[in-house]
Image (cartoon, helix red, strand yellow):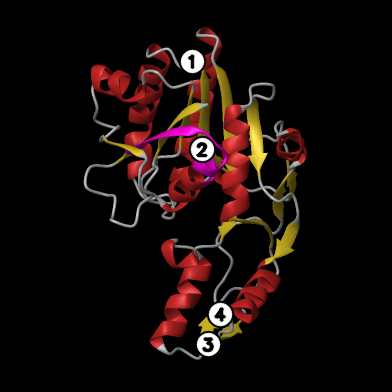
């Protein structure tokens, strides 16, 4: 299948492109101008495009001829309070509108568990969304707006809701990358909250598989949780990470309060994505 992937040079995107190529798909990568380093995957089509400020014709030229579009691009995804989330959301909508105008009827868009807001327990496709930070608010607006757009144009839309990602931690901005940075500075301890919250952690390679396989299929549409489906405490995840990496740093708990918008326990229902993977 011919797939055009936005945000292809990012933390998630690089892994997705690698998996898609290894799975035998023909991939076109849309990357921000000047953002791709020499280590990016070779012999793959790279299109430099500022997609949030691209014209209708520029978008059509970039995506035309593909069978599917996977829209991963997003600015400041690790900073949930950044005002750019609200400022840019209509530009993402316009980009996807232009993708549809170019004739692509199979579209997948990256979502986030932050659309849900404060929730305790498992998240499924019917879980109510009440986001409480700019990142979640913008993503949830885009989800609703593009769902309406796809219905009007008979597009198969997959909203791929992601959770907590591990792996390639040197390239992310997660708690695990911060632990690595603290170890490199020679810190002996790393301050945390209680560590008792339960989250849905998924390795980036497994996530890449889920994102690509969910994109290329058309039987399941709407919200698809791309997750492990297994709640794990932050304490367990951190201590496992330190052990597996052979780090010397020690976690210090109860040094910070839990963020107000962080749930005590939240994880995705992975039944749909597991069914997709089982059929590939």
Q: Earlier in the sequence, mark 3 or mark 1?
A: 1
Q: Earlier in the sequence, mark 4 or mark 3?
A: 3
Question: How busy is the neighbourhood of tag 2: few (under 14 within 10 Å), some, or many (20 plus)?
Answer: some
Q: Position of residue 256 (x, y in %)?
A: 54, 74
Magenta highlight on residue 269:
no
Please tell me which residue lies in front, 163 or 123. 163
Badge number at residue 189:
3
**Disc 4 to disc 3: CB gap under 8 Å:** no
Q: Which residue is mark 4?
A: 255
Q: Position of residue 229 (x, y in %)?
A: 74, 49
| Point 48% across, 47% down: residue | 18
Q: Quadrant of the C terminus?
A: top right
Q: Which residue is mark 2?
A: 110
Please tell me which residue lies in front, 179 or 84. 179
Q: Which mark is in front, 4 or 3?
A: 3
Q: Position of residue 71 (x, y in %)?
A: 45, 33
User: For numbered disc 2, what is the local secondary structure?
Assistant: strand
The relative height of residue 9 versus residue 147 in the rendered view (above or below) is below
Badge number at residue 149:
1
| Point 35% across, 48% down: residue | 42
**Disc 3 to disc 2: CB gap under 8 Å:** no
| First to last magenta residue range | 19-30
Distance CA(mark 4)–CA(mark 1): 46 Å
Q: Earlier in the sequence, mark 1 or mark 2?
A: 2
Distance CA(mark 3)–CA(mark 2): 34 Å
Q: Earlier in the sequence, mark 3 or mark 2?
A: 2
| Point 71% across, 56% down: residue | 265
């Amino acid at each position: 299948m011919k797939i055009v992937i936005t945000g292809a040079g990012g933390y998630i995107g690089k892994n997705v492109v690698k998996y898609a190529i290894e799975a035998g798909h023909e991939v076109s990568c849309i990357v921000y101008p000047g953002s791709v380093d020499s280590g990016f995957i070779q012999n793959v089509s790279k299109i430099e495009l500022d997609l949030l400020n691209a014209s209708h014709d520029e978008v059509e030229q970039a995506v035309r001829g593909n069978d599917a579009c996977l829209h991963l691009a997003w600015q400041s995804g690790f900073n949930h309070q950044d005002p750019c989330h609200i400022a840019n959301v209509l530009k993402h909508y316009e980009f996807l509108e232009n993708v549809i105008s170019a004739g692509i009827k199979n579209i997948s868009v990256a979502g986030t568990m932050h659309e849900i807001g404060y929730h305790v327990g498992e998240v499924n496709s019917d879980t109510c969304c009440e986001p409480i930070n700019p990142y979640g608010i913008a993503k949830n607006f885009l989800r609703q707006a593009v769902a309406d757009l796809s219905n009007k144009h008979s597009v198969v839309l997959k909203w791929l809701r992601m959770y907590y990602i591990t792996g390639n931690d040197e390239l992310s901005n997660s708690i695990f990358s911060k632990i690595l940075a603290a170890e490199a500075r020679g810190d002996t301890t790393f301050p945390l909250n209680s560590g008792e919250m339960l989250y849905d952690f998924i390795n980036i390679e497994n996530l890449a598989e889920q994102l690509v396989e969910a994109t290329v299929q058309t039987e399941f549409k709407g919200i698809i949780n791309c997750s492990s489906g297994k709640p794990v405490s932050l304490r367990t995840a951190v201590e496992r990470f330190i052990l597996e990496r052979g780090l010397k740093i020690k976690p210090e708990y109860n040094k910070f309060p839990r963020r107000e918008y962080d749930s005590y326990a939240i994880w995705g229902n992975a039944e749909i994505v597991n069914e997709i993977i089982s059929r590939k």
